[in-house]
Image (cartoon, grey):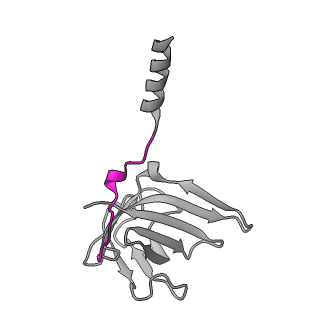
Amino acid sequence: MNRIFFCVCLVMLLSCDKENRDEFATGTSENGIVGKWILVETASNDGTARSNKVDRNSKKYVVNFDSNGGVKSSDFPCSGKYIFDKNNAGSREGHTLSVSFDKCKSSETLWYSINGIADARIVNYNNLILNSENCDEPCTRVYRRLKD
């Protein structure tokens, strides 16, 4: 009986899918948007008071913003360009992030692709929250900064 209990416990322990917290940046950073980010959650609204949140950790959608205005994304085979208005970040007036990939097309159609215009804000230095202008109803993409 003890062997069965031990085997069941072992299987349960090994089958747990835990988020690897070691991969995320912690503490403060003055880098603004520069760095490597991974999509961890999307939230959308169907016009009612309900919000539909989806864990996106398993997608491994990664975006890398460099200090020269270049951006790389999991769904584009080439580099793109971005403009981030850090002085207006977090306000609801105007768009604070613009990303474009002029030299290539996306390898897959993803509604949460970084391509386009969005309102962006950085929370606690290591959480990037985007609200796309392409959504009729509110839709949010939440990214976490990865360690260098």
* Residue at 44% in and 88% down: 88
Q: Residue 60 location in percent, x, y?
A: 40, 52
The location of residue 53, given as percent across then percent down, is 59, 58
* Residue 67 or residue 32, whichever sits in front: 32
Q: Using residue 8 as the reference point, say whether residue 126 is left or right of it.
A: left
Residue at the top extreme of this rendering: 1
Q: Which residue is at the front of the view, 12 or 35?
A: 12
Q: Choose between 134 and 67: the one closer to the eye.
A: 67
Q: Is residue 110 visible?
A: no
Give the quadrant of residue 89: bottom left
Q: Is residue 124 magenta?
A: no
Quarter of the figure with the C terminus: bottom left
Asked if residue 138 lies left or right of residue 78, the reply is: right
Please give the range of residues in magenta: 17-30
Magenta segment, prevailing SS (helix, strand or loop): loop
Q: Position of residue 123 (x, y in %)?
A: 44, 73
Outermost residue to the front: 2
Q: Residue at x 37, y 71 (%)?
A: 101
140 and 101: which is toward the camera: 140
Dividing the picture into quadrants, the one containing residue 32 is bottom left
Q: Is residue 2 above or below residue 136?
A: above
- Position of 75 with respect to 64 (left or right) is right
Locate residue 1, reporting x and y percent: 51, 11
Query: Can residue 19 be seen in this snapshot?
Result: yes
Q: Quadrant of residue 107?
A: bottom left
Residue at 40 percent of width and 74 percent of height: 100
